[in-house]
Image: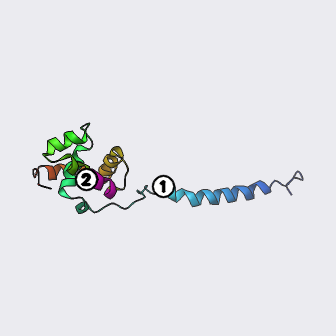
């Protein structure tokens, strides 16, 4: 008991438990966040997929991208489907965000300079 006859020491036990909980969580908050999925190897995207990936940040539609790359709409759709699967995303904006995280858009720009390929 404390000097006034109360159990003043009891709250301190709660504080110690809280402090332990905080110290357990703190390292997870300080360490850099990692993407929940592993990054695909840079070579996993084909040259055609990298060329299409370059156009995903634009406002161009799939038919417009096909026209820019001189490929069929079906080819663009196939590449987009494969890009989404390989980057483990569900939509265009998530693909762009993930590609930026992985710095794949720089690779896409480089492969685009190689010129259109028959895919």
The answer to whether residue 1 is left or right of residue 102 is right
Q: Residue furthest left?
A: 115
Is residue 109 inside the magenta stretch?
Answer: no
The secondary element bearing badge 2 is classed as helix
81 is within the stretch colored magenta: yes
Cα separation between marks 2 and 1: 40 Å
Quadrant of the drawing holding the C terminus: bottom left
Residue at 56% x, 58% y is 25
Q: Residues within 10 Å of mark 1 (few under 14, many from 20)?
A: few
Q: Position of residue 35 (x, y in %)?
A: 40, 56
What residue span does the magenta drawing correspond to? 78-86
In the image, is residue 37 above or below residue 100?
Answer: below
Residue, far right: 5
State the residue in front, 103 or 25.
103
Tag shown at residue 30: 1
Which residue is disc 2 drawn over?
A: 78
Q: Nearer the viewer, residue 91 or 29?
A: 91
Q: Residues within 10 Å of mark 2 (few under 14, many from 20)?
A: few
């Amino acid at each position: 008991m404390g000097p006034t006859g109360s159990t003043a020491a009891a709250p301190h036990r709660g504080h110690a438990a809280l402090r332990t909980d905080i110290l357990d969580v703190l390292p997870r908050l300080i360490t850099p966040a990692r993407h929940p999925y592993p990054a695909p190897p840079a070579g996993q995207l084909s040259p055609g997929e990298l060329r299409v990936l370059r156009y995903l940040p634009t406002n161009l539609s799939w038919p417009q991208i096909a026209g820019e790359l001189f490929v069929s709409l079906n080819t663009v759709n196939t590449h987009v489907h494969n890009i989404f699967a390989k980057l483990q995303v569900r939509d265009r904006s998530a693909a762009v965000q993930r590609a930026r995280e992985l710095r794949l858009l720089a690779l896409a720009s480089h492969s685009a300079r190689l010129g259109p390929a028959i895919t």
